[in-house]
Amino acid sequence: EVASTAEGARRAGKEKAAAAIASPWAAKIYGLKIRQRDVQDHMGNSTRFLVLGQEPVPTTGKDKTSLLFSLPHRAGALHRALGVLSSKGLNLLKVESRPAPGKRWEYVFFVDVRGHADRPEFRQALTRLQKQTQDLRVLGSYPEDR
């Protein structure tokens, strides 16, 4: 976590596998390659900042886990998938659908769930959820209050 965009850009310039959302000015100063310009100029755009790393984050007792999955196009598929999480007492914090890349009228679901994926009940839910989904990815677990 950093206190400013400039500090994030500076750190991204020092770490080989790092990236930052910053201005062209910051890219020039810190020697960053610009991957996408003017991300702020898309109408209705909102930014969610993520910290990605190679090592799993240990449980803190106040965590959340982000999941990404796609479902078969059948009545009740989302209801059944979310019911798996509920059956294990896992609280949904966010459910967001997005068009699936390259697939008309199909969607992927981003779901934030309270809890750490290393907890036994979470692992059990993921095993059951895998059977309900076409593709399931655990994007990561991390402290909730950041």
Image (cartoon, grey):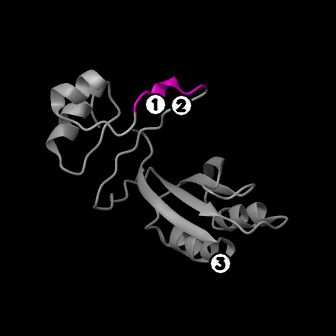
- Residue type at mark 1? Val
Residue positioned 39% across, 36% down in the render: 36
Q: Position of residue 108 (x, y in %)?
A: 64, 56
Query: Which residue type does callout 2 highlight?
Result: Ser
| Circle nearer the viewer, 3 or 1 | 1
What span is in magenta?
37-43
Res 46 label: 2
Residue 44 picture location, percent across and down: 61, 27
Q: What is the CA distance from the residue labelled 1 to the residue labelled 2? A: 9 Å
Residue named by callout 3: 131
Q: Earlier in the sequence, mark 1 or mark 2?
A: 1
Identify which residue, 128 or 72, lies in the foreground: 72
Of badges 3 and 2, the one in the foreground is 2
Q: Position of residue 120 (x, y in %)?
A: 49, 72
Q: Give the amino acid at mark 3.
A: Lys
Q: Which residue is mark 1?
A: 39
Secondary structure under the numbered disc 1 in the rendered image: helix
| Above or below 42: residue 119 | below
Which quadrant holds the C terminus?
A: top left
